[in-house]
Structure formats: C-alpha cells, structure tokens
Amino acid sequence: MDKNIYLDHNATSPLLPEAQTAMSDAAEKSFGNPSSPHWAGREAKILLEEARVSLAKSLGAEPREIIFTSGGSESNNAVLRQLSAASGKQHLITSKIEHPSILETCRILAKQPNIGLTELPVDSSGLIDPESLMKCISSQTSLISLMTANNETGCLQPIEELGQIASEHEIIFHTDLVQASGKIKYDLHTSGIDFASVTSHKLGGPRGIGLIYARQGTPFESIISGGKQERVRRAGTENVTLAVGFAKALEWYLENQDRLQKQYSHFRKNVLGRINNIDGFFLNTNLDHSLQHTFNFGFRGISAESLLISLDLDGVAVSTGSACSSGAMEASHVLLAMGRSRAEAKSSLRVSWGWSTTEDEIDYFLDRLTHHIQRLQKKQAN
C-alpha cells in the first residue's frame, strides 16, 4: 500500500472531518472568554452550552450533570481524589485491570492512613465476578470505581449489575467510560451510575478535552480551584472550540453506531479467520463480552515488540497495549491479572480499528502480519 495504516484507535482516533468543520466554525465565533459578560463572551458561552446540551443528550444525562475537563485522566483523578478530603476511615474498591489513571491514583490514595484499598481480581477472560465485589464491601466502603470497557482487551464488564450492588449498599459508584462511550448503547440516567469519565479523542474528537458525569445530588468537590467555571466544580477557562468538536464527534458516532459495529465485527471475523490456525496463536479478547473494534492476541515464542517494529517499518501502526519504561516494553498488568504468563504478555499485540479503517487496510495488515510471523518462526527454527 502507498499509505500508512493506523490500527491504534484505542490510543487515539484520527479527527473526524465533521468535528474539524464544527471546530473551525466555532473558532471564528468563540474567541471570547465564555465567562466574560460582553457580547464576545456571550457568543462563546452560547456555543459552550450548546455543546454541553448535545453531550448530555448523547449520554442520557442532564446538562447540569456535565463537567468539562482536560480528558479521561483528569476526570478519573477528580472523582477518586474526592476521598482525599473525606474524614474518618474510608475504603476504596477498584479492579486489577483498570487504566493507570485509576489504578495508580488509587494506590497513591491508599498511602493515606485513613484510606484502605481493595483491588478486585478478574477471571481468565478479564471479567469481574459481581460476587467478589459483594464480598469485599464493608461499612467503610465509600467509593467503587470499575471501568466499563478495558482499553487493552476490550472486555466489557457487567457494569449495570456492579453498579446495582453499589446502589443497594448506598456506595458511590464511578465508571471509566472512556473506551466504551459512543461504541455501545448507554444511558447514564437509567444506569444508576453516580460518576462517569468520558474523553473526546477516542471517538474522533479533539485531544485535550473530556468530561465528568456527576449525577445530580452526588457531592463533588473541585480539585482545581480559583474560578467559578463549571458551576464551581472545575476552575479554568473552558475551551469552547474543543467542546464543540467533542460534542460533534460523540453525536456522529451515535448516529453511525449500528453501521460501525457491523463493520467492526466484520473486521474482527476477518482477522480471527486469518490467524487463529497459525502455530502458537492465543487470544486475550473475550469475543462474547468485548468491544467489536478491539482485538488482543499473541503468538507464543514471538516477541510482540519484534512484530510491532516490523509492522511499523511496513507503515502499519499497532500497539502492545502495555506501558513503556525507559525504552523497554513491560508486561501488561491487565494480561498478568488475567493469568497470562509474563512471556505470553510480552508476546501480545493490541489492534484497534475505528471510523477511518477500510477493508483494504485490514487485508494489508493481515498480509504483513502473517509474513512477519512466518519469518520470525522460521528464524527461531533455525
């Protein structure tokens, strides 16, 4: 192929043309500060609130329940750090497969003498057993934070059942909705969720903006002070242009959701059909409970890093789904929690397609992938 192929949409998705157009139009009209009382500020404020209304409608929320942030990591931190100001003994529950912005923040909070932490295990397919959540709830449990969809494997949790358990025990429940929003049908109003984190750039919206859904009546203290913005819940001048792009991207994704899901399912069947009979193949994605656009797999004895570099030289961008430290690939904490060996975790690739992916690109990726697997296996045999 004469162009580069991007199959790492779970990291970030290319900007949708519709979002780009909406942002260009907004940028011409919204140069004012939306907190300013004059005409320029009022024009910016109108666009900001229109974006908020659109996002709320897309998520099944009320506009007043939407708090703009800089992205998913800030949203996750803002919710979790509500415990920092709480007095008395507190108990926090999360899982071993959360995004680092959840897991690392929980572990930092647990260093405080009054905060205890439980990290729920998952089974070999990455699912949390609701029974395990029920068993670890105590009288001191004040917050439960569990992701809806895993960023590495695409595994979808039984989030409504988990949220119902929290509700029955009158415990605040937060979900990281970053990977799932727009990809699955979800209504926050009927979900029983108290807090949810959403970001723009996984949907083909701009980077640098996200939101917190805070159910009306749920206590929330700002972790960024110094201004009255966002109903005194997040200080700082709002980025109107990014908010408009965010709203347009989520709106577009929901309008095209059925078509995209069929396409993503077709891509996944093609990929699985081409590689599942290759020696050493193993699958990390639970095909029955996962996002259709995420596929995590590996080949025993083949370094994922070698495959990633080889594909990159062919112009194909994929991911290991794991963190890099000092240039060395680390074993994924998600895959280790699922019971994969360290060698298997280091042999695993994550491929994630999106709105811009074509069938020709999937075919080219498969041609190059199978070529490199055969090459590396032959090299090992010799």
Image (tube, rainbow, N blue to C red):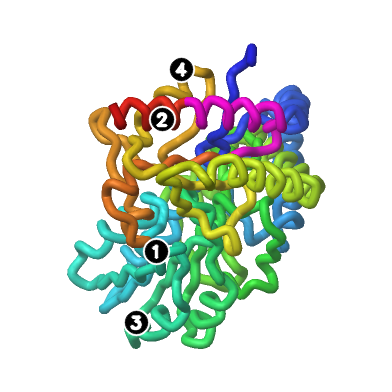
Query: Badge 1: few (under 14), some or many (20 or more) residues near its Cα, within 10 Å?
Result: some
Quarter holding residue 136: bottom left
The residue indicated by pointer 1 is: 82
Residue 85 spot, x, y in % from top left: 33, 65
Are the two marked residues, 4 and 1, in contact with CB atoms closer than 8 angstroms? Answer: no
Identify which amino acid the numbered label 2 is placed on.
Answer: Leu
* Mark in the foreground, 3 or 4: 4
Return the mark for residue 136. Answer: 3
State which tag comes first along the sequence, 1 or 3. 1
State which tag comes first along the sequence, 3 or 4. 3
Q: Quadrant of the N terminus?
A: top right
Q: What whole-number distance in Å separates the C-alpha atoms at marks 3 and 4?
A: 48 Å
Return the mark for residue 307. Answer: 2
Identify which amino acid the numbered label 1 is placed on.
Answer: Gln
Query: Badge 2: few (under 14), some or many (20 or more) residues near its Cα, within 10 Å?
Result: many
Identify which amino acid the numbered label 3 is placed on.
Answer: Cys
| Span of residues in magenta | 353-371
The residue indicated by pointer 4 is: 313
Q: Is residue 314 left or right of residue 98?
A: right
